[in-house]
Amino acid sequence: MTELKYYVFATRNKFAMKIDERVEPPMFKITETHGAATWLLHPDAPKIEMPRELAARLARSGKAAHYD
């Protein structure tokens, strides 16, 4: 098995990309007070649909589901 240098959960994450195995992602700004280090927020990343379970949970909580 190849040692993963940056994203150790890449083999278990269905959204992981090849770059996750090679390069640590930068911090992407979500809001003024929140950020996330994930290549899925890069402008060139493939677009993915929000999992139904998450959309349902957000709908039940009354929070808007913004997933761009």
Image (cartoon, rainbow, N blue to C red):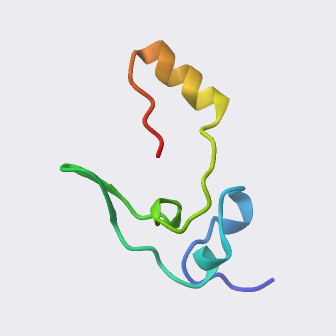
- Furthest-right residue in view? 1
Name above or below for residue 29 compared with residue 63.
Answer: below
Name above or below for residue 6 compared with residue 15.
Answer: below
Residue sitting at 53 percent across and 22 percent down? 57
Image coords of residue 45 (percent x, y): 56, 65
Residue sitting at 34 percent across and 67 percent down? 27
The answer to which image quadrant residue 11 occupies is bottom right
- Residue 31 left/right relative to 6: left
- Residue 49 left/right relative to 37: right
Name above or below for residue 41 compared with residue 31.
Answer: below
Residue sitting at 54 percent across and 79 percent down? 6
Image coords of residue 26 (percent x, y): 38, 73
Image coords of residue 34 (percent x, y): 27, 50
- Residue 64 left/right relative to 2: left
Image coords of residue 28 (percent x, y): 35, 63
Query: How many labels sit on residues?
Result: 0
**Quadrant where the N terminus lies?**
bottom right
